[in-house]
Image (cartoon, rainbow, N blue to C red):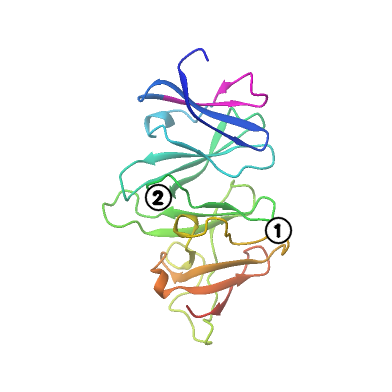
Amino acid sequence: FVDGTVSNFATMSEFIVIRQGKDDKVMNAMVSLDGKNFEKAIFPYNFKETHTGIYTVLNSANHAVNLFIETSGKEGHKFGTIMRSNSNGTSYVLSASHVNSDDGSLTDFESIAGLEGVALINIVSNPDSSDKKALQTKISHNDGADWGFLPAPAKDPEGKSYSCSGSSSSCALHFHHYTEREDKRKGFAVESAVGFMVGVGNVGPHLGDMKDADTFISADAGLTWKSVKKG
């Protein structure tokens, strides 16, 4: 490599992504399709001034790289941006901001098994606050080009109405995500049950405590949800 040493690398689909630089202050993402020729990842103008240089290669498909880039490195309040690449992995556009991560750089992002282009993320809705992170769940059905809130079901498992309804920042369905799972192999769906998704969470302005969570199921790739179990 012409300008520095490799500090880490990851492979995903046909891509090889490395973290490369001369010192802790200069860290670049480099991408290759053949393992021999590497090109620098090009991010939107001025984005380099807002991130920490910590990269995580997320599950990537459809001949593109989903790259999580940490933008807040404060312990207990980490989050970042998901960038999506072009077909050779070198040019990136913004997919989602303020995506939640934990102190180990694990990220609340999941490509839904068996459903091409569908993904769930948790975002930090109060990124500028020093208070505890307030998390909200969003879904994309077009490979991260657009993200929307999950529509809240009208009734709980006992047939009682929830305190709010809709799919907006003030009221939606929110799920406990990857960073909270004890078994990281589990997900919201399996490939053998196409279109079915299961999540544990709550209806409201943001994600609540696990002890107050209910179980929800979708049979149409996350377009509508039903509350099926209390707790």
Do the residues under discs 2 and 1 have CB atoms within 8 angstroms?
Answer: no
Q: Quadrant of residue 22?
A: top left
Res 172 label: none
Q: Does the magenta segment cover residue 121?
A: no
Q: Which residue is outermost to the left?
A: 130
Q: Residue at x 42, y 35 (%)?
A: 54
Q: Which residues are magenta?
A: 27-40
Disc 1 marks a residue whose amino acid type is Glu
- First of labels 2, 1 by sequence position: 2
Q: Residues within 10 Å of mark 1 (few under 14, many from 20)?
A: few
Q: Position of residue 42 (x, y in %)?
A: 53, 26
Q: How many marks?
A: 2
* Residue identifier under label 2: 102
Read off the residue under disc 1: 191
- Examine the structure image and report whether residue 31 is included in the region drawn in magenta: yes
Q: Nearer the viewer, residue 141 or 61?
A: 61
Q: Position of residue 72 (x, y in %)?
A: 35, 42
Task: Compare residues 186 and 41 and report the one nearer the observer.
Answer: 186
Residue at 47% x, 60% y is 182
Where does the image place residue 125, in percent across and percent down from the top left?
Answer: 39, 55
Depth check: give the residue in front, 27 or 71: 27
Is label 1 in a helix, a strand or a loop?
loop
Please give left or right for residue 230 compared with residue 132 in the image. right
Q: Which residue sits furthest front?
A: 183
Question: Label 2 neighbourhood size at 10 Å, few (<14), some (14-19), many (20+)?
Answer: some
Q: Position of residue 146 (x, y in %)?
A: 57, 50
For marks 2 and 1, give the CA distance.
27 Å
Residue type, mark 2 in image: Asp
Q: Is residue 73 above or below residue 102?
A: above
Secondary structure at badge 2 equals loop
Residue drawn where x is 53% and y is 74% of the image: 215
